[in-house]
Amino acid sequence: MPGHEGRTYVVTGADSGIGEHTARTLEEQGGRVLRCGLGAEMDVRANLGSESGRDLLMKEIAARAPGGLDGLALVAGLTEASADAVHVNYFGTLSVLAGLRPLLRLKEQPRVVIVSSAASLSAGDDDVITACLRGDEEAAGAAAERAVAAGRGGMLYRSSKIALNRWVRQSATAEEWAGTGVVLNVVAPGVVETDTARDELLAAPDEVRMLSAALPQPLGFPGPVQAVADAISWMISAENSFMAGQIVFIDGGADAALRSDKPYSDGVRYGPAAMSRMLFWALRARVASWRRD
């Protein structure tokens, strides 16, 4: 079990579900947790769908943790079929991450976990995803509104999560993150038994049958929330010292059931510049070996 004694964390979306379980788990294991959400019992109440809400969260956290942060669990998200899902899930998450990065840099072993979703295994809205990855919130919001008007609002939740996954894969190994010791990874849960899932996804038997066909979970449907919280607890701990940019599916086996070995069927293909560098250093190593002999 990872130890969190002496470490300070921010958990967004701590009102319920995965965020609530994560905050409680970190505290039970010795961590100090600053809970962020919309409920009256939260340490910081802020709506991440607006710039003012994001600024408020960052200001409040800076005041409460002037010595720095050891980790972020960015859980907050909306499942609703509206543009708000894109503003909160993608832009709210990354705005908070960027704004709190200076506080992470104050600590020796900072860790970040972003919560995505196994829903990201399905295709999303290309216009929304492209605008998100460009960092253009206005264009992403407009694309989301078009999707809603066309009856494709149900794609927006997973589109925002696909964009998060891709951003992390592109960014986690950059100098400003892994290069400065800030470890950044993603957890992608399957359908787990949160209040939101019970109210929105699991209320009708036919809906459950459809979801279990779309997202088969051999280990159980729905899955346990605590399993996701436990994974986040380890990934945000100092023990997680050598994993960066990974999307870890805590999904009861859905990723493997749906994709089998497809993501790994082809090896890495290096470009001409990378091949030239590798050949150069290989030749240098061989020459050095000959000289030693």
Image: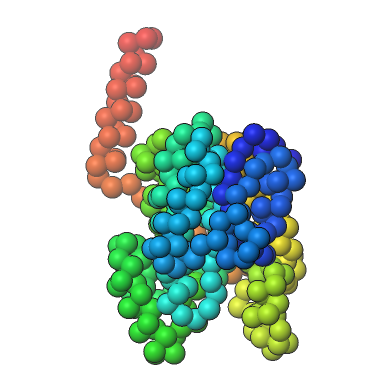
Query: Compared with residue 268, is residue 287 higher up or lower down, i.e. above or below?
Result: above
Horizontal arrangement in the rendering, residue 73 relative to residue 25 (left or right): left
Q: Image point 48% across, 55% down: which residue?
A: 57
Residue visible at 49% across and 44% down in the picture: 63
| Total marks in image | 0
Vertical relation: 235 (above or below) 263: above
- Write the residue at 38% across / 78% down: 144
Q: Position of residue 189 (x, y in %)?
A: 62, 63
Q: Tell me what residue is drawn at x 71 percent, y 87 percent.
A: 204
Quarter location, residue 188: bottom right
Toward which corner of the image does residue 159 lie, by quadrant? bottom left
* Residue 162 spot, x, y in % from top left: 46, 66
Image coordinates for residue 224, horizontal then vertical, percent: 74, 63
The answer to whether one can see residue 30 in this image is yes
Residue 101, placed above or below residue 205: above
- The spot of residue 76 in percent (x, y) is 55, 63
